[in-house]
Image (cartoon, rainbow, N blue to C red):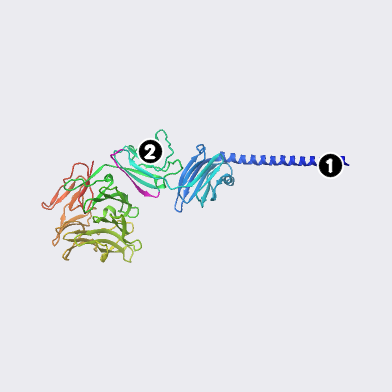
Amino acid sequence: MKRWMLIVTLGSVCLASIWIITAFYRSQMMEKTLNSVTAGETYAFEQAFQRLLIGQQDDQASFRIAEFERGKMPKQPIQLGLHKKEAFIHIDVTTNQSLEAAESFLSQVELIGDVKYSTSVREVSRGNYQLTMTFSEIKDEFGFRFGNIPTITLRRMAPLALTIQPGKAEGAVLMLPESRESRSLYITEGLGTILLRFSEPMIRKEEAGRSVNGYPAVWLDDRTMSLDVRRVNRAALDLTQFHSQSGNYLPEEYRYVALYKKQPLSWLSYPDSEVVGFSPYDSFYDRLILSPDRESYLGVIDRGRSKSRRGDRQVALVLEQRGRDPLLIEPMLEGSGLSHATIDWLDAGRFLYVEEKLGTVYHLATGEKTPLFDETSTGSIALEMAVDDVDGYLYIVLVRPAGDKNLYRVEKRTYRLHDLVLEKTESLGEALLHPREKLPAFPIRVRKDGIYYTIPGPTENKTVFVSRKGKSWTAEGEVVWANDHSQAVLKRKSDEEAGTYTWWQIGGRQRELHVTRAEVMPFGPYLVTNDGLRYQIWDDRRKRWEPLDLAEGDIRLSAAEGNAVYSRQR
């Protein structure tokens, strides 16, 4: 009996052992089979992979962070900065399989961290697919990896900062924002190198000494690059291609940096030819507006045609104060710019700049900007301004929709100069204004003996002169220039593009002012012309044009109502 029980027990143990061995063998075979399938899928993904693009996006646009081609993937785990709300990756693959099969590759992307995602796939061309994963609700960081690609971590960071300086003492550089994805970099002609100083230690990459869009560059240390700009002009530089050692990079406006070279200039006053400019940025200015005490001035940079209205200009405005660094007031003013009087000093401590819809007063003592008017909801457009420091008033000329299509009412507003309180609004008549056409001219000029302002007429504009005693006179044409002795030059319509000019002595008849192929413009208190060959000044005593005696060199004048200043190439 005992022997029988022993045999039964041994048999049970043997059977159990056989079952365990069999089960273990089966599980091993199953795991081996599964592993072989996974390895096969991974191998297929690795073979199909062509390119990885990592990007970020917000509600308005998307931007590239980094891009890796097949064979140039990182060998070690890396970290990249994230500046925007969401992130995404595009994985380009080439395979002879179906779209559904290509989409299955996305299941091999492993995510590290708490993040939400969505996927999509599209066929770019036959056999070429782009796999996309979009990541949202990102907290501080997350990572991903797939195939033989190491972990790539995206971490929230504040964008890298950059300072650009001239490579030598003489010369200047000025960076201005252009758009969401671009900037303009102005440098003085003759400057051989500029220094790019990054706010963090950088990853130094050099390709045979040609590091920035094919232009020679040398890293001086981990934060500073010297860029050779001798052969660079009107070129676009991508400065977002550089990454710091932490994986950070510059914001998207550095993706397209347009470089412009400007001839070195000095600004002088007429007739004494004394230098009035004292800024390293003087070479970039197209116009200088001196303060009443000449201790400050406004530098106006013409940035090109307006994108909204024909004939208008975009300008940047820089404040220069003696003994202080230049201060960028506005990088891009959308308005009539250089063609209309829309920027001027109210006194030595305040200036006003006017756009089509906004008037802003800047206070030098506090650095504060205060609105004078805001017409964004009324449809009104500001055209001209003038300061009357004799009676203490500020005048603004605007056009306001009159109800009928393209019909506008021309208005003149009068503000008290000391506290900028609006005292009255006067109607000057009505005018037609077609969308996107050049804004009409209704100039206003203030002189010691009275005020000239232009009003619309049935066939052409007229100019009204109101003396300080309240008496008024009217003549045909729009005022171009006037002096303090009841004399003015008016521009009248003509078959010629430049128009014709008349001399108007208040109380007398208009007589033609002979001008040969030239525009007439104010040069401070003087009247000048430029026929393309030389500048001439009106000599009222001799009643004729005389050569304008200026300092030697390449001279440029800009129309200006205040001080007579001009630039000379150094």
Q: Which amino acid lies under the numbered mark 2 shown in the image of this protein?
A: Met
Question: What residue is pinned by disc 2?
Answer: 225
Q: Nearer the viewer, residue 299 or 279?
A: 279
Badge 1 local density, few (<14 within 10 Å), some, or many (20+)?
A: few
Identify the residue at image location x=36%, y=37%: 226
Q: Is the N terminus in the top left, top right, bottom left or bottom right quadrant?
A: top right
In this rendering, position of residue 236 left or right of residue 459? right
In the rendered image, the vertical position of residue 561 relative to residue 41, given as above or below: below
The mark found on residue 8 in the picture is: 1
Quadrant of res 36: top right
Asked whether residue 172 is drawn in magenta, I would say yes
In this rendering, position of residue 15 left or right of residue 276? right
Q: CA distance from mark 1 to mark 2?
A: 86 Å
Badge 2 local density, few (<14 within 10 Å), some, or many (20+)?
A: many
Span colored in magenta: 168-180
The mark found on residue 522 in the picture is: none
Q: Position of residue 212 (x, y in %)?
A: 39, 39
